[in-house]
Amino acid sequence: MVNAEKPKSKLIEIVIMKKFTFFMVIFLISASFASAQYFVGGSLNFKGTSDKTEIDGTSEKSSSTQFSFHPKGGIFHSEKLLFGAELSFSIRKDKTPGDPETIERTTGFGISPFARYYAFQMGKFSLFGEGQLSLYTSSTESESGGTTTEGPTNNRIRLSVFPGIAYNINEKIELEAKINGVNFGIIRNVSKQDVAGNEVKNINTDFGFGADLDKIVTTGNITVGAIIKF
C-alpha cells in the first residue's frame, strides 16, 4: 500500500513536545534557585557499515548509516542532589540490495528527566543513586520500487534506578560510572501499525531487578562518562 496515513506520527510528535515543554518548565523553575550550579554533558555518535557480496561476477552491496545525539544538562540543587534531563535524537538508514532495492529509514526522539543523590563522599570519590524516567518514540518507513510504506510506530516508557560512582577531577569536571550490575527497571513498549486499514497494536511490559556482581568489571555493565560544571 502507498503512503499510510501520517497524522498519527504527527500526533505523537505533538504529545512528545508537550511533555518536553512540561519538563523544561520544571527545569526552569528549579533553575531559579540562586545557589544552583549547572552542568552539561552528553554524546554524539555516527556509524556507517557496508557489506558486499559477489555471486558469479555479480555484486550486491548493502549499507547502514546511524546518527545519534544525546545532550543532557541540569542543576545541582545542593551538594548532594541534582536534577537534569537528557534528550535523544537518532536517525538510521538501511539499504538492502534486490530488484528493486529497499531503503528503510528510522527516526527517534525522546526525553529522560532524572534525579541523582550523592549518598557518600570520600575525598574526590562519591557514591550516588540515580532514578530516570525515559519517554521515547520512533517511527519507520520503507521505500521500494518507488513505493513508500509506513512501518510500525513505537512508544516506550522506562523507569530505572541504579547506583554509580563519581570522581571529581577538578571543580569543573566530574567523571561518572554507572553500574548496571545492580538495577531496578520497568519498561512499557507500545507498537502501532496500520495493516490493511486496521490498526494493529502490540503492548509489551518488562519488569526486573537484581544484582550481577559476577560481571561487574565487564565493559557491558559499566558506563563511564563525564559532566562539566559551570
Image (tube, rainbow, N blue to C red):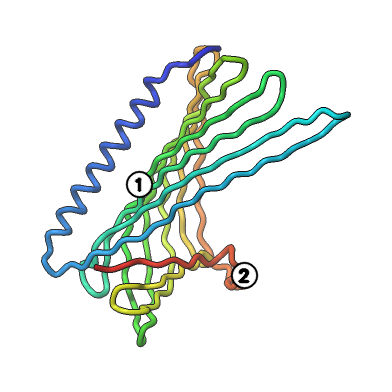
Most foreground residue, 180 or 145: 145
Please tell me whether mark 1 sits on a helix, a strand or a loop. strand
Q: Which three-letter amino acid code belongs to the residue tagged 2?
A: Lys
Please tell me whether mark 2 sits on a helix, a strand or a loop. helix
Q: Which quarter shows the C terminus?
A: bottom left
Q: Looking at the picture, how far across and down is residue 19, in whole percent?
A: 28, 40
**How dense is the environment of label 2, judged by Cα within 10 Å: few (below 14), some, or many (20 and up)?**
few
User: Which disc is residue 111 wearing?
Assistant: 1
Most foreground residue, 144 or 50: 50
**How dense is the environment of label 1, judged by Cα within 10 Å: few (below 14), some, or many (20 and up)?**
many
Q: Residue furthest right?
A: 56
Q: Which residue is mark 2?
A: 215
Give the side of residue 167 with respect to residue 195, left or right: left
Q: Nearer the viewer, mark 2 or mark 1?
A: 1
Per the model, the C-alpha gap separating discs 2 and 1 is: 29 Å
The quadrant where residue 172 appears: bottom left
Examine the rendered structure and indicate whether residue 190 appears above or below residue 208.
above
